[in-house]
Image (spheres, helix red, strand yellow):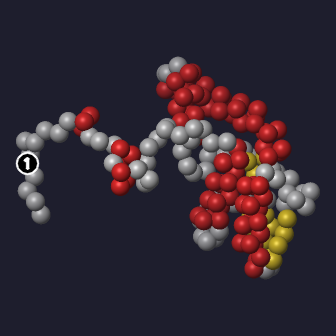
Amino acid sequence: MTKRNANATIDLSKLVGGDEVEQFKAVAPVKGNKEPRTLKQILQDNLAWQMEKLYPNPEKKQARWFQSAGGQTMFHIKINSTLLTLPNGKTSAVVDDDKFEDTMSAMAKLIEEGFFDEQLEKLEPAHQARLASAAATRAKKQGISPEKAAEQIAAEEGDNGPKA
């Protein structure tokens, strides 16, 4: 173990960001440097999160888009607590357990191809209102301007991970 110099002074403001060093650019967490995610991107991220984090861990207690019983799985897809209409014309569907992962892959492809775009467009005003409400609440709690709070929220929307 190396001996540390207790008298050393480090100017932390001069440290180089991970996103500025070539070998770390792809993995460096940088908050707020991305464009806000679209509802389509949020939907894609949330579906991926459901399948990667929740599906393999049935004991994990979180809101799921699926429920299994008797060898079958019922699922729905939602954004901002709004159920989307699936290709069957309903807001839920049931598949055999052994077909669930393939079905979710097919749903991911439908999202990518734009199947849900019309529904997402209709939800956009409510999404923007939700962001504005969150900004107003943050501004009040933190004592900052509503504009600054909106900038923070927009930056966070650009970060990966489920937000809706």
Closer to the camera in the image, 3 or 33: 33
In the image, residue 49 sits, relative to residue 118, either above or below, namely below
Q: Quadrant of residue 103?
A: bottom right
Name the side, left or right, on which 24 lies relative to 138: left
Closer to the camera in the image, 96 or 16: 16
The picture places residue 160, in percent across and down from the top left corner, at: 55, 49
The picture places residue 2, in percent across and down from the top left corner, at: 10, 60
* Residue depicted at 53% across the width and 40% down the height: 34
Look at the image and tell me whether residue 45 can be seen: yes
**Where is the N terminus found, in terms of image quarters?**
bottom left
- Residue type at numbered disc 1: Asn
In the picture as drawn, the residue positioned furthest to the front comes out as 22
Closer to the camera in the image, 72 or 22: 22
* Residue depicted at 65% across the width and 28% down the height: 132
Q: Quadrant of residue 62?
A: bottom right
* Residue depicted at 40% across the width and 50% down the height: 25
SS assignment at label 1: loop
The picture places residue 147, in percent across and down from the top left corner, at: 56, 21
In the image, residue 66 sits, relative to residue 25, either above or below, namely below
Q: Which residue is mark 1?
A: 5
In the picture as drawn, the residue positioned furthest to the right comes out as 89
Closer to the camera in the image, 92 or 42: 42
